Amino acid sequence: MRNRTLAIIKPDAVSKNVIGEIVSMITQAGFKISGMKLIKISRQQAGVFYEIHKDRPFYEELLDYMSSGPIVPIAIEKENAVEDYRKLIGATDPQKAAEGTVRKLYGQSLAFNAVHGSDSDENAAIETAFFFSHSELVDNIR
Ligand code: UDP
Ligand code: MG
């Protein structure tokens, strides 16, 4: 089934100037872009986005990181989008990520790992709606 997921190019990758390289990897892998923007979010907005992790020990550091500089949320679609995009980015820890994955190529550490990817269709819909209103999304799904 053709569906959508949410990618985010995180502040470390934006400051490394590799937005184009990462977008290229996404489109080369067969994803269509339905929405994309360069924005900076507040610490409070980051807290809402990552609410699911509020009890984890890395939560405060994660909010500092995600609000530290511009990010690029990208709504993307493809058959099996959630799973295939997570395969493309690799394991959360760049050191454990497979060769050729986005995190292996551009991540620096478990915390600063270059990109985000939704983990389910349900969360993909919630996370996409966090960054994009309905009218900001192009519907490539037909
Ligand atoms: N993170 C961290 N320390 C950890 C686990 C995660 O700093 O031990 C950060 C990292 O930036 C990660 C994000 O928190 O991408 C969300 O964690 P999650 O377990 O959801 O990993 P993901 O879904 O991004 O692979
Ligand atoms: Mg996650």
Image (cartoon, grey):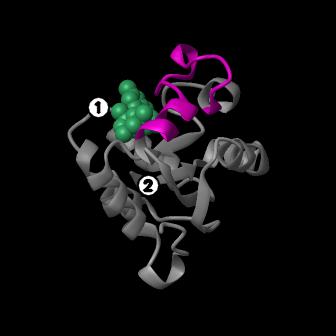
Residue 12 part of the magenta segment: no
Please state the horizontal and vertical placement of residue 73, each as a whole percent of the image. 55, 59
CA gap between label 2 and label 1 equals: 35 Å
Q: Earlier in the sequence, mark 2 or mark 1?
A: 2
Q: Is residue 98 magenta?
A: yes
Residue closer to the observer: 106 or 101? 101
Residue beneath label 1, please?
57
Q: Amino acid at mark 2?
A: Arg
Mark 1: which secondary structure? Answer: loop
Q: Is residue 7 left or right of residue 106?
A: left
Q: Give coordinates of residue 16: x percent, y percent.
A: 76, 42
Q: Quadrant of residue 70?
A: bottom right
Seen from the viewer's position, the closer of residues 115 and 48 is 115
Crowdedness near tag 2: few (<14), some (14–19) or many (≥20) residues, C-alpha within 10 Å: few
Measured from the top left, where is residue 10 in percent x and y? 58, 47
**x, y percent for residue 101:** 63, 27
Type of the residue with mark 1: Pro
The numbered dot on residue 2 is 2
Q: Is mark 1 within 8 Å of ligand 1?
A: yes
Residue located farthest toward the left when viewing the structure as drawn = 55
Q: Quadrant of residue 3?
A: bottom left
Residue in the picture at 71% in, 43% down: 28
Q: Residue at x 33, y 56 (%)?
A: 47
Magenta-colored span: 83-102
Viewer can see residue 71: no
In this rendered view, identify the residue nearer to me: 37 or 49.
Answer: 37
Q: Would you say the residues marked 2 and 1 are in contact, meaning their CB atoms lie under 8 Å apart?
A: no
